[in-house]
Amino acid sequence: MSVLSFSLVCVDCGTSHPGLAVRYRCGCGGTLDVVHDAAALTGKVGFDQFDRRLASKEPADRSGVWRFRELVLPLAPEELVTKPEGNTNLYRSGPLAAWVGIDDLAWKHEGENPTGSFKDRGMTVGITVAKKLGMDRVACASTGNTSASMASYAANAGMKAYVFIPEGKVAFGKLSQALAYEATTIQIAGDFDVAMRLVQEACAARGVYLLNSINPFRIEGQKSIAFELLQDLHWNVPDWVVIPGGNLGNSAAIGKGLMELLNLGLISRLPKLAVIQAAGANPFAAAFKAGRPVVPLASAETRATAIRIGDPISWRKSLRGVQASGGTVDEVTDQEILDAKAKLDASGIGAEPASCAAVAGARKLAAAGVIGRGEQVVGILTGHLLKDPEIVVDYHRGTLAGIASNFANALRRSEPHLKAVLAAMGD
Ligand code: F0G
């Protein structure tokens, strides 16, 4: 199991580099894929083996990432830094499905990961590799969730964490996590894209290990969302998977995982991937519509701060899965995101705003007839509702400038006596 049979291959020029190395880009500037030895895996991994591990008490089997370790990274169980992550639930809601306009609609809630977002799946692999490489300092730029996850896993592994965040644009749930887990947290007077550039420069200057999703090992962990959601569906392939998109690491990872299962003959077709961006941070949706490469936005703006990104690093990788599956890329307005959030929250499922781009996107694609009402659809909810409590309160108070609180649950006040309380109850 500890024989490392993988390499890092450039997405642009195809050059192959040694597998276990501190490297994020090819000499040509292209990003890198972890490429596994498919010949060594074919016939040696199977769904029944992954199902058997569900009954195990071993941390490596209990993790919704490392349960699939042959497909993720072939490391020995004792090498792993795991909490364990994954094992997130699939939720359904009749009223929400009716509002979205899709009958068979399930939501995989990645907000149920240990630090409240899907990032933990990539981070367990990123930190495990950092440890194996002997790195004791790690860093990332983040809109909040990556930094919360990295800070926590770094603390577990006894590493020093540096977090670069866009000043004033990180939701409090996430900012408080980075501080609480003792990361050195630096607010950059600029947006995420500036922070992303600076963290790469700082890591190169100081020999700190970079743990953004440009790190190819992060993607390997992230792709377990696809494995686990198929396992949740008894290994049946849905018609669509709908994913919110920012820096595009997650959709790239889900596409990679699914294409690998197809290549190994473990599934016979791909679900179509729909990547949904916020309209104010839509470089990938605009490029897809125009059939051209991504042109970075000078500035991105959305209240879904997690996906407030104008220059997504992984767009080429994400496009591969979208194209191979016959999927699509679309965008939704902040009004659509926040209305969808109110509906998702009111269903009792709940998620942070960026996740709700997937809800709004599914509804838009259903209305346009791109997704058929009778198709089987799984949406990915990427972060917990409590990551961004301020926007919930502001929405229901009706104090978000430029946003109509169409589904407000107004906060009520009462004088301290029964008659007033009953009136406030609406009785
Ligand atoms: N949803 C949430 C809650 C996120 O935090 C992010 C990204 C995304 C969706 C988009 O995923 O970037 O892989 O396309 N958050 C990153 C961060 C950028 O720093 O936490 P993506």
Image (cartoon, rainbow, N blue to C red):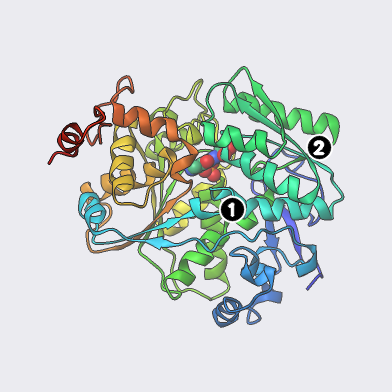
Above or below, 311 against 55 in this view is: above
Q: Identify the residue position indicated by label 1 in the image.
A: 114
Between 381 and 221, the one lying in front of the other is 381
Answer yes or no: disc 2 within 8 Å of ligand 1: no
81 relative to 219 in the view: left or right: right
Label ID, residue 234: none
First along the sequence among labels 1 and 2: 1
Q: Secondary structure at mark 1?
A: loop
Q: Is residue 332 left or right of residue 227?
A: left
**Badge 2 density bin: few <14, some 14–19, many ≥20, Cα 10 Å:** many
Residue 202: image x %, image y %?
77, 28
User: Is residue 109 at least partly visible in the picture?
Assistant: yes
- Return the mark for residue 208: 2
For this rendering, which residue is in front, 309 or 131?
131
Q: Dot 2 lies on which element?
A: loop
The answer for how far apart the CA atoms under marks 1 and 2 are is: 25 Å
The local crowd at label 1, few if under 14, some if 14 to 19, many if 20 or more residues have their Cα within 10 Å, is some
x, y percentage for residue 347?
29, 51
In the rendered image of this protein, does residue 69 appear above or below residue 401? below
